[in-house]
Amino acid sequence: MLPLPEKGVSASRTKHNCDLQLFCDWMEGCLLFKNEKRLSRTDIVDILCEQAIYDDQEFANEWLDIVWGELERRQRLLDGAAPFNVELRAIQRKHTWKKVPAYAFCVLTPLLQKSANWRPSQTEAESAEHYGQQGLLFERISDESLRGAGWSTHLTAWSSKNTARLPAVVEKIAQQVGEPEHANWETNVSPNANEAGLDIVFFRAFNDNRCGFPVYLVQCATGADWDTKLHTPVLSVWQKLIDFASPPQKAFVLPHSLGAEHFRHITVRVNGIVLDRYRLHDSSRRPNWCSQELAKDLKEFLGPLIANLPDYD
């Protein structure tokens, strides 16, 4: 079993002070990454009291009533693709992480953000490479999810190893969506920019090959500072780059689970659509919906991180 996360699980005496989404991620993580076949309510209450998160078992069980409601919501959203099954007094494992690598990525990422000691020791250069690889993998997860939902996509895929500058990115996107570039756009936007805050374009054209169809410009964010990126990509910048006949819209994608109230707040700030973990893994997907190539790369990335995870004492 995993230890409780270092942040987000706080002492609760007269009110519940734990992060609901993170706590549920911890429970799922115990099943996915530590091969626990079953977590009972009794076991979890014991841990909460042992760790002095709760003094009173009845109050701890009140918290677990809330947790069970969230886990049931998650199972319902995932439908048959859920890697766990919620029972009356326990949560039961259906799949380990290797069977659902894209979903496992989205569970582990928030857990590591709240538990720095769970991460392997890395030099500054190794850490930069790790987060670069993490970002690219999540962009690929997002891209495959959107294509699986019937959208056409273009992945900008800018990285330190793929340094296509903005002119090449703009040219390719303009070709993809069938819109002209603005003449002399370099007077408004520096051509030395990377991708101008854009990770993916997804769209759905009509068969008449004319302009004016849904186009979304996407920011994918996996870092702990993801909420600082909600303003990107900046639509006014991209409308200086490409002469869209109909204005594009924004989308923001993240691996976290968001409760209903938080989801609404984030959507308002994005001023577009938000795809969290459960929109990426909607109920129309098979448990292992990602491509074999992506699954292989995810397993290679996740394997060392999971091997390094501590055990609950």
Image (cartoon, grey):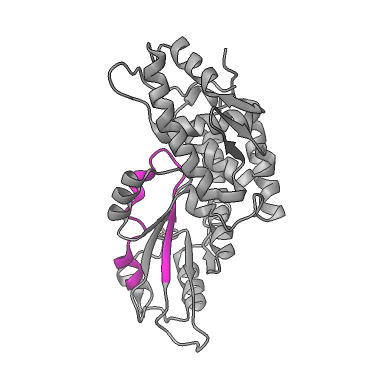
Q: Could you tell me which residue is drawn at 36 percent across and 19 percent down?
A: 59
**Residue 149 appears in which quarter of the rendering?**
bottom right
| Vertical arrangement, residue 313 with respect to residue 283, above or below | above
Return the x and y of residue 199 as percentages of the image width and height: 47, 58
Q: Residue furthest front?
A: 88
Residue 135 visible in image:
no
Question: In this image, 87 relative to 245: left or right?
Answer: right
Q: How many marks?
A: 0
Q: Is residue 249 magenta?
A: no
Front residue of 197/110: it is: 110
Q: Is residue 233 magenta?
A: yes
Relative image position of residue 128 (x, y in whole percent): 51, 38
Image position of 158 with respect to 216: above or below? above
Q: Quadrant of the N terminus?
A: top right
The magenta region covers 215-239
| Visible residue check, residue 284 | yes
Residue at figure coordinates x 53%, y 38% from the top left: 107
- At 60% from the left and 38% from the top, the residue drawn is 84
Q: Position of residue 191 (x, y in %)?
A: 40, 65
The image shows residue 17, relative to residue 198, as above or below, that is above
Residue closest to the eye, 260 or 162:
260
Q: Residue at x 44, y 43 (%)?
A: 257
User: Is 211 drawn above or below residue 90 in the view shown?
Assistant: below
**Quadrant in the picture for the C terminus:** top right
